[in-house]
Amino acid sequence: MKTIKITTLVLAGLTLAFTSCKKEGCTDETAFNYNEEAKKDDQSCTYDQNITLKFTQEFNDVAVTADDLDEIKFTNEHGEKLSIIRLRYSISDVRFYKADGDSVLIDMHHLIDLSDANSLSTVLATKINPGEYTGVGFNYGFTAEDNVSGAYTDLNQAVWNWPDMIGGGYHQMQMDGRYINSNDDTLSYNFHNGSATKNQSTGEVTTNYVFVKLANSSFTADAAKTIDIKMQIDEWYKNPNLWDLNVLYTSLMPNYDAQLLISENAKSVFTLGGIN
């Protein structure tokens, strides 16, 4: 009997020791930090997070929405009063930067249309890993490699194409409206941006995309996040190039110098509205 009791106690002790020595960790196979060796869940699981991009617009720090379309209510830096009838622009390839200098690239593109509420936000198709990120960047327009005529069905359907004779690919922006010129006449303007063609006969083209890295855009991906990308519309007309609509108001697409000026101004247009 003593032998049986001793054996039972030893077995019980071994069972207790084995149970207490189970490796702890994240046991959820869907988690970012899943540990296949863990036998006991320690509630440490973290998960890849959804990122939503939200697009807002302002003119001289005042919000601009579809309700403001076709009203001559804005004044640019040069002093012209103007309206916005249409505003569309595209972005691509969002990047999330890490403290070690590495970055996560999300291969995507999105067309924003001020008149279409559904286009004013998009959920990225790829989630990002949880953790600390030091900044957010994206392309205004497409890189030369991606700016291929006819490559994107959705953009073709939106008639977003840039004519092949002046560089091909796609628009980066369309801003159309009316303005009051120096003679007090109300005229239409077409402020369009895309590839800049210096010489149509030789095909000398400058891809005009601009890489934007949003200032003060660090965040922790510990839950789903919404990143507000704000377009400061007034910046198109002033920084660094003061824009005179009396001189440059239409036929800008084939104008090489005008296209370069617009893209230079694009560098200060986008700011961070917030990350929530």
Image (cartoon, rainbow, N blue to C red):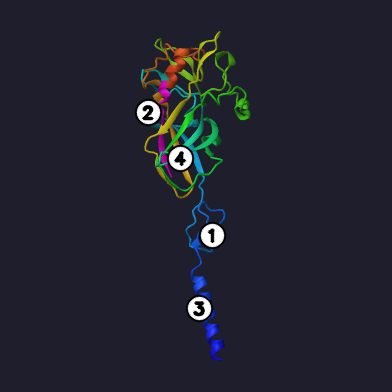
Element carrying mark 3: helix
Question: Do callouts 3 and 4 mark residues in contact (Cβ within 8 Å)?
Answer: no
> Going 52% across and 81% down the picture, which residue do you hit?
10
Front-lying residue, 44 or 194: 44
Question: Do callouts 2 and 1 mark residues in contact (Cβ within 8 Å)?
Answer: no
Which residue in the protein does label 2 denote? 60
Percent x, y for residue 115? 53, 30
> Going 47% across and 36% down the picture, which residue do you hit?
95
Question: Do callouts 1 and 4 mark residues in contact (Cβ within 8 Å)?
Answer: no
Label 2 environment density (alpha carbons within 10 Å; few <14, some 14–19, many ≥20):
some
Q: Can you name the residue that lies furthest to the bottom here? A: 1
- Inter-mark Cα distance, 3 to 4: 55 Å
Label 3 environment density (alpha carbons within 10 Å; few <14, some 14–19, many ≥20):
few
Give me the disc on residue 91: none
Tell me which amino acid carries mark 2. Answer: Asn
Percent x, y for residue 232? 41, 29
Tell me which amino acid carries mark 3. Answer: Gly
Tell me which amino acid carries mark 4. Answer: Ile
Label 4 environment density (alpha carbons within 10 Å; few <14, some 14–19, many ≥20):
some
Element carrying mark 1: loop
The stretch of residues the image draws in magenta is 264-276
- Inter-mark Cα distance, 2 to 4: 21 Å
Which residue in the protein does label 3 denote? 13
Give the quarter of the figure containing the N terminus.
bottom right
Question: Do callouts 2 and 4 mark residues in contact (Cβ within 8 Å)?
Answer: no
Question: Which of disc 3 and disc 2 is earlier in sequence?
Answer: 3
Question: Which of disc 4 and disc 3 is earlier in sequence?
Answer: 3
Front-lying residue, 187 or 125: 125
Tell me which amino acid carries mark 1. Answer: Glu
Which residue in the protein does label 4 denote? 227
